[in-house]
Amino acid sequence: MDGSAHINGSATDFDFLIGNWNIRNLRLKERFAGCHIWDEFHATSTVRKLLNDTANLEEMDMPSQGFSGITLRLFNPRDGSWSLHWADSRSNFLFPPVIGHFDDGKGVFYGNDTDNGTPVRVRFHWTPSPKAPLWEQAFSKDGGETWETNWVMKFTRMPA
């Protein structure tokens, strides 16, 4: 988390995401280069609950990018936080989790990673919506003083 204790989370925080989705991805072409050009591509995902409804698993397919991925989200009832774990078919590696919680209708999650060998702080923002949730990823090379948003996913629920 961001250093503050938090006990108001709920195992239902990600219920808005359960189901089948079309995703419009916008990914920054170059990170930390002052770039304002975005690659756009399509993805689909399916999200289902697990572990007595205290976790969910998202399976995502990005055919134009040549890979698929999964996100395992685990709720911690002891402190109300969520840990989000990503793996994909390009790396076949479970990336370090981002950890956080929902406040005032938004989810904010932080973690540590590397970008082309450089350590970065990672931030995910989730804006819940039953029909059109939004996910944003940002990196910081200065410990969280400044952030560059480098990936945005705009979800649209698939027709039943």
Image (cartoon, helix red, strand yellow):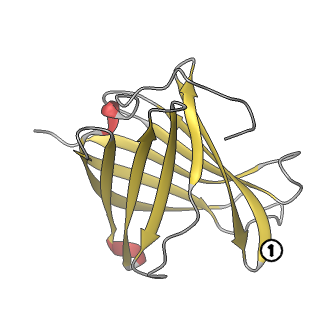
Circle 1 SS class: strand
Position in image of residue 57 (x %, y %) = 31, 53
Residue at point 39%, 79% (across, down): 89
Q: Give, as a three-letter code, the residue at label 1.
A: Thr
Position in image of residue 3 (x %, y %) = 75, 37
> Which residue is labeled 1 in the image?
118
Position in image of residue 140 (x %, y %) = 80, 55
Foreground: 59 or 100? 100
Position in image of residue 100 (x %, y %) = 59, 39
Residue 81 in the figure: left or right of residue 43: right
Snapshot quadrant of residue 67: bottom left
Residue at point 33%, 31% (across, down): 16
Q: In the rendered image of this protein, does residue 88 appear above or below residue 146?
A: below
Q: What residue occupies the far front of the structure in this picture? A: 78
- Quadrant position of the C terminus in the picture: top left
Q: What residue occupies the far top of the structure in this picture? A: 104
Query: Could you tell me how many numbered marks the image carries?
Result: 1
Residue at point 49%, 51% (across, down): 84
Mark 1 neighbour class, 10 Å CA radius: few under 14, some 14 to 19, many 20 or more: few
Q: In the rendered image of this protein, does residue 89 appear above or below residue 101?
A: below
Residue at point 22%, 40% (across, down): 52
Foreground: 42 or 60? 60
Q: In the rendered image of this protein, does residue 156 appear above or below residue 12?
A: below
- Quadrant position of the N terminus in the picture: top right
